[in-house]
Image: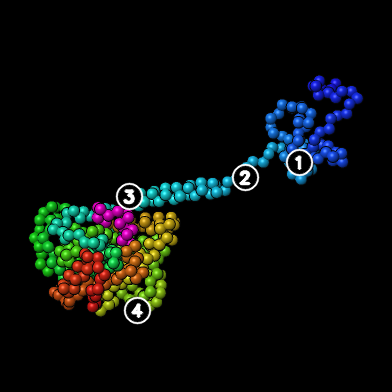
Amino acid sequence: MNDWPEQQRRPQGQPYPRQQGYGDRGHGQEYNPNFTQAQATGYDSGYSTGQVYGSPQGGGRGPGGPGGPSGTGAGARPAGPAPDWRKRIKIGSIVLVAGVLVWGVGTYAWASSQMRNEVDLSKVIERPSEGDCTTYLIVGSDSREGMSAEDKKKLHTGSAEGKRTDSMMILAACSSGNTMISLPRDSWVTIPNFVGSESGKAFPARGGSKLNAAYAMDGPELLVRTVEFNTGLRIDHYAEIGFAGFANIVDALGGVEMNIEKGFKDKKSGADFQAGKQTLNGEQALAFVRTRYAFAESDLARTKNQQKFLSALANQAATPGTILNPFALYPTLGAGLDTLIVDKDMSLYDLGKMFFAMKGISGGDGKSMNMPIAGSAPQGSLKWDMPKVKQLVEQIRNDEPVTVTSDR
């Protein structure tokens, strides 16, 4: 039985109506691929899928059906819109930037929590006025904190109790150029009146003394007070690191490359260097900056080596290869921050600025020098050339290019 609707049945004896799109081209009918069977016959199948019989997107026979040039089989749906790659790239970039920001904020928060903000500069009395540059007092101490007996033997540090200043330098970060000034620990200075950082007790001024005696008497606060009193330069930030932290930072960086102009040996520090370019590990680096007995002008020669090494260290640490690489950044920060003692107002950002200032000196943006020396003083100490010191301080305070030189 024919189940087509009555109105669609062909009257007996009449031919089927000619359908556009399926006509015989030989009889003048042009092929129309967009003409549907439903249009031709009035039949509506009830489907609303948009399927067109005989069209290139259809599933019927014809140019778009099976075996046709673009056939996809019976019941195939039209192809979706082409992917918007610009939108995908934009979304991917946003996700990447957000990830980097989250990592950066997390790293900053973690590193900040590792810093030891222990030095209270608010306890320093009678301070000079602020200048136009940012000044740092950088101290290397002989602290053996956290070192095992094996570490002490390996690093040739000895086992003395307490801690003393092994090196001291002022770093002035200025827009006119950065300056690093080493302060020989045997400098002959006046230790001014001060208030004990722990006891709160007032102490009178002490006449001529070696500079490192100030630290031994009352720690970082009195050292800052003494440096400010004898120079007239205000110290904005304080940073101190011990033997172990120094060696660990160098090792975390994979060593620091140095060009040693003249070889030297020193049994006390463990130094044994040949001339030429070489990479120093933590043990060798510590020996390099501590050696004094291998040189005629022991303290002054050592301060020059310390400046040279710290500039090289900063030059290697403050690079994208270290800062942007978590496999290099985290070990470096972890190796040094827990042994680095800074003032209460110093942030990780300030510490970064300090390293970049040191890096700038090694790159030629500034100069390094010893405090100008006029000659010898009692107890084998060194007397500062005060006219030159005052000129040097005035240039730094006013953010002027430093023209003062040191003869040693």
Image quarter where the C terminus lies is bottom left
Tell me the residue that label 2 is attached to: 82
Q: Earlier in the sequence, mark 3 or mark 1?
A: 1
Rendering quarter of residue 159: bottom left
Discs 4, 1 touching: Cβ within 8 Å? no
Distance from Cα at disc 4 to Cα at disc 1: 85 Å
Q: Position of residue 224 (x, y in %)?
A: 19, 61
Tell me the residue that label 3 is attached to: 113
Q: Is residue 213 visible?
A: no
Distance from Cα at disc 2 to Cα at disc 3: 50 Å
Q: Position of residue 370 (x, y in %)?
A: 24, 72
Tell me the residue that label 1 is attached to: 64
Tell me the residue that label 4 is attached to: 262
Distance from Cα at disc 4 to Cα at disc 3: 42 Å
Q: Earlier in the sequence, mark 1 or mark 2?
A: 1
> Which residue lies most toward the right here?
13
Label 1 sits on what residue type?
A: Gly
**Badge 3: few (under 14), some or many (20 or more) residues near its Cα, within 10 Å?**
few
Label 4 sits on what residue type?
A: Lys
Image quarter where the N terminus lies is top right
> Which residue lies most toward the front here?
28
Camera-nearest residue between 180 and 97: 97
- In the image, taking residue 251 as reference, residue 161 lies left or right, namely left
Camera-nearest residue between 360 and 300: 360
Label 2 sits on what residue type?
A: Ala
The residue segment tinted magenta is: 342-355
Mark in the foreground, 4 or 3? 3
Mark in the foreground, 2 or 3? 2
Q: Earlier in the sequence, mark 4 or mark 1?
A: 1
Q: Position of residue 121 (x, y in %)?
A: 20, 55
Mark in the foreground, 2 or 4? 2
Q: Is residue 72 visible?
A: yes
